[in-house]
Structure formats: structure tokens, C-alpha cells
Image (cartoon, rainbow, N blue to C red):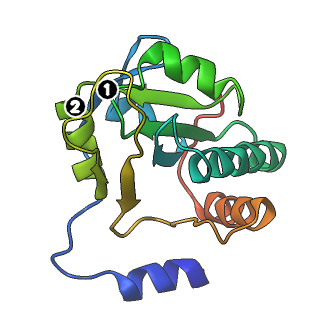
Amino acid sequence: MARKRIAETTKGIGRPKVGGQFELIDQNGQRFTDEDMKGKYALVYFGFTHCPDICPEELDKMAGMIDIVQKTNGNVVRPIFIICDPARDTPAVMKTYLKEFHPALIGLTGTWEQVKSVCKAYRVYFSTPPDVQPGQDYLVDHNPDGDFVEAIGRNFTVERAARVINEHIGDWRGKLDKE
């Protein structure tokens, strides 16, 4: 109940919502939309497969959280990795990359316009260097900037993050899809 009270007291008037309609492609080449997120708690992470350190660390953490949450509550989370580098992160690249983390992870990509649109809807800033040549290595600057149900940052351990998610699930009074 404390989380609900904090959420209500920090809710601003006139602040934009986080999320919205989108259509992307998953790591299997299948269409995935915001409608596919309904029925489960969505754990959404924005990153890119060529990230040398933070993204893989956070996806490892997400994998641990998924396992802990599933042991406690069943299959009630939908973990999603939305890429911020559509030029390099094709479905095939994501499929290979995500195998290293957790089988439940859903990787999403699209055209540059589609990725920009979903990042804007979720209030995530991203920028790639201009004039990159094919095959040239580069980093993608990206970070969230918004209000979320809960933002689980790098300072969270797997156990603390899973506890926060389990508490939110415990507070939920609606129906959850466990399939």
C-alpha cells in the first residue's frame, strides 16, 4: 500500500503518459505490438546488442529477476528488450544475442522511424553518431527520461529488483495471464 500511496502523491498533473501504440518485429521476425504486452507485467529494457558493458549486465540482472519472480508468482512477466540501434540490431542479431540471457526475453526492432517512435512514447532518448560507415563500430547514447510504474536502475541487485516486482504483482487485484 505504501507504493500505491507514493505513486499517487508523486503523480503530476499534465505529465505525459509512458508508453503507447507501437508495432515492431521480434527476434523471430514476427509482428509485435503494444497489444501483445497486455495481460502480464512488462519488464521493458531499452539498449543495443553491441553495448560493451551496461546492457549485458542489466540483461543478466533481468534474467535473474525473471527466474525469481516466476518461482514466486508463476509466468506473469513479459520481459522485453527494445533496441535503440535498428541499423545493426536485426531480428537475427537479436535472436543470437538474447540466447545468452534468458529464453523468455523478447527482442524488438524495426525501422529507424518505428524505433524512434517507440522510444519517444516510452520517453527514452537515443542517438547514434552521424555519418557512420557500414561495418564501422560505434556506441549508442540512450537513457530513459520519464515516470514509470517502477524504474529499476543499475543500483538494484537482482534480489531487490525481484522483490520490488513481486510486491507490485502482490498489490495487483486484476487478472494476470500466466500462460
Is 138 on the left or on the right of 18, as rendered? right
Mark 2–mark 1 CB contact (< 8 Å): yes
Q: Residue at x 43, y 38 (%)?
A: 82
Name the image quarter holding the N terminus: bottom right
Vertical side of 107 occupied by 167: above or below: below
Q: Is residue 38 visible?
A: no
Q: Nearer the viewer, residue 117 or 133?
A: 133
Q: Secondary structure at mark 1?
A: loop
Q: Is residue 35 visible?
A: yes
The residue indicated by pointer 1 is 87
Name the image quarter holding the C terminus: top right
The residue indicated by pointer 2 is 112
Mark 2 or mark 1: which is in front?
A: 1
Please name the amino acid that badge 1 sits on. Ala
Q: Residue at x 36, y 70 (%)?
A: 147
Q: Nearer the viewer, residue 128 or 43?
A: 128
